[in-house]
Every structure is written in C-alpha cells, then in structure tokens.
Image (cartoon, rainbow, N blue to C red):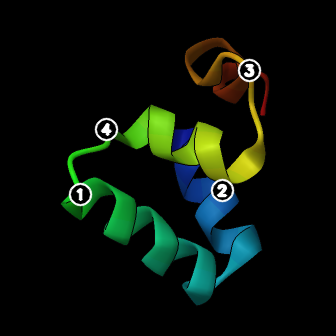
Amino acid sequence: MIAEYKILQEKGDKFKQKIIDLKNNGIKTEPAFGLLLGLENPYEDLLKF
C-alpha cells in the first residue's frame, strides 16, 4: 500500500483517475497499477518500489 501511495504522489491526478476508473470497472488495485505501469507481475514488482 505504501508503494501505491508513493506512485500516486509521483504520477499525479491523471494517473490516479485512471486507477480509479480501472477499479470502478472491476480491476483490483495491483493489477490496475500493473496495467498502467507495464508490470509483468504487479504483486511482486510493486514491492520493489
């Protein structure tokens, strides 16, 4: 959760809104970040941030 917060702070409001839109369409948090950041395995890759 800390990694997601830091990424949201860095990427700004447009990125945050894209995450919200994906979540509203049924995509969970980590996969949503993975899609937008191009991560292969968002669960593991987000831990590296």
Mark carried by residue 40: 3
Which of these two is toward me, 19 or 48? 19
Three-letter residue code for mark 2: Lys
**Mark 2 or mark 1: which comes first in sequence?**
2
| Residue density around tag 3, few if under 14, some if 14–19, many if 20 or more, within 10 Å | few
Q: Is residue 29 above or below residue 40?
A: below
**Mark 3 or mark 2: which comes first in sequence?**
2
Determine which quarter of the picture holds residue 23: bottom left
Q: Position of residue 17 (x, y in %)?
A: 45, 79
Query: SS for tag 1?
Result: loop
> At 67% from the left edge and 21% from the top edge, which residue is drawn?
47
Query: SS for tag 4?
Result: loop
Q: Is residue 30 visible?
A: yes
The residue wearing badge 2 is 6
Three-letter residue code for mark 1: Asn
Mark carried by residue 28: 4
> At 56% from the left edge and 87% from the top edge, which residue is drawn?
13
Position of 8 with respect to 38 (left or right) is: left
Position of 40 with respect to 23 (left or right) is: right
Q: Position of residue 16 (x, y in %)?
A: 51, 74
Q: Are marks 3 and 2 in contact (CB under 8 Å)?
A: no
> Quarter holding the N terminus?
top left
Alpha carbons under labels 4 and 2: distance apart: 18 Å
Q: Nearer the viewer, mark 2 or mark 1?
A: 1
Position of 32 with respect to 8 (left or right) is: left
Q: Is residue 1 visible?
A: no
The residue wearing badge 1 is 25
Q: Nearer the viewer, mark 1 or mark 4?
A: 1
